[in-house]
Image: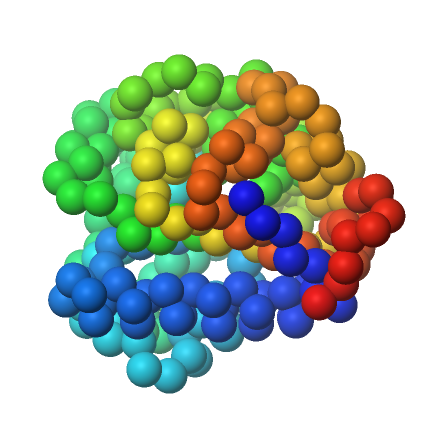
């Protein structure tokens, strides 16, 4: 795993997007297509804005899966990750091949169906973020590092749910769904490449715990350190608690 620290969240998003666009071009040139997993949330705004503006990406050759979705939340809700991806990625790029996690009626069935589709071919690039509690996708601590399932129906802890309120997606904690469909830790690690974008001071404690502490289910994103081709993009604020000696680029 590599860490890159940029001056601010805009620079981090742009650098990650340049990296991601290049990886997409390489995969499409080599294979004729690329399979990606996309993250959502406020931390991905700058990254997706830059990525969807990148030149020379044949988006019609891209197949999209997403990391997670709330159980019981309609696609029309502002916090729906399906709506997020439609607004910030699919409609801007005109991706036609995408697999949504619909958690409204049969989340277990959806997890199995989309998981089976995901396993049919390798994932080229997984885009990710890290939660304030160190979660990776919606795998809150203690995360399941052992499950071989592609997607799990998981319970969301209070810290995770409160983050959604603080980011403005929900008015109060009681409005945040208690469960979600989440890509499993092992499935995320199956991607050939992982690009994580983790800006802002509110992520600093999680960044330090995950990247300087033990690799542990109590710090779910710490598992990224075991991946041979993962790059984490930070800004100066999210990197502020890391030990000195790491260069800002």
Q: How is the image coloured?
A: rainbow
Position of 76 relative to 208 (above/below): below
Between 249 and 209, which is closer to the camera in this rendering?
Answer: 249
Between 143 and 245, which is closer to the camera in this rendering?
Answer: 245
Between 72 and 202, which is closer to the camera in this rendering?
Answer: 202
Between 114 and 241, which is closer to the camera in this rendering?
Answer: 241
Query: How many discs appear?
Result: 0
Residue 70, horizontal then vertical, whole percent: 42, 36
| 76 with respect to 235 (left or right) | left
Q: Is residue 2 visible?
A: yes
| 81 with respect to 200 (left or right) | left
Residue at (32% x, 82% y) in the render: 56
Residue 209, horizontal then vertical, whole percent: 72, 31
- Give the quarter of the image for residue 104: top left
Q: Quadrant of the N terminus?
A: top right
Residue at (42% x, 29% y) in the render: 185
Position of 218 relative to 75 (above/below): above
- Give the quarter of the image for residue 213: top right
* Residue sitting farthest toward the right: 244
Residue at (42% x, 79% y) in the render: 54
Position of 147 relative to 48 (above/below): above
Q: Quadrant of the C terminus?
A: bottom right
| 149 with respect to 153 (left or right) | left
- Give the quarter of the image for residue 9: bottom right
Residue at (37% x, 83% y) in the render: 55
């Amino acid at each position: 795993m590599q860490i890159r620290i940029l001056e601010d969240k805009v620079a981090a998003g742009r650098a990650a997007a340049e990296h991601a666009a290049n990886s997409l071009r390489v995969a499409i040139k080599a294979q004729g297509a690329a399979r990606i997993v996309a993250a959502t949330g406020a931390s991905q705004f700058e990254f997706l804005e830059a990525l969807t503006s990148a030149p020379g990406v044949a988006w019609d050759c891209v197949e999209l899966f997403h990391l997670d979705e709330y159980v019981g939340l309609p696609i029309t809700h502002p916090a729906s990750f399906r709506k997020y991806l439609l607004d910030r990625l699919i409609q801007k790029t005109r991706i036609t091949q995408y697999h949504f996690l619909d958690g409204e009626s049969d989340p277990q069935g959806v997890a199995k169906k989309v998981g089976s589709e995901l396993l049919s071919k390798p994932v080229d690039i997984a885009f990710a973020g890290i939660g304030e509690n160190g979660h990776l996708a919606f795998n809150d601590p203690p995360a399941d590092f052992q499950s071989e399932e592609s997607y799990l129906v998981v319970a969301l802890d209070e810290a995770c749910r409160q983050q959604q309120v603080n980011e403005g997606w929900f008015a109060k904690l009681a409005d945040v769904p208690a469960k979600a469909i989440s890509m499993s830790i092992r499935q995320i690690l199956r991607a050939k490449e992982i690009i994580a974008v983790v800006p802002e001071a509110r992520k600093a404690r999680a960044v330090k715990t995950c990247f300087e502490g033990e690799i542990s289910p109590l710090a779910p994103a710490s598992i990224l350190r075991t991946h041979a081709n993962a790059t984490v993009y930070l800004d100066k604020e999210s990197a502020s608690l890391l030990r000195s000696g790491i260069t800002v680029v």
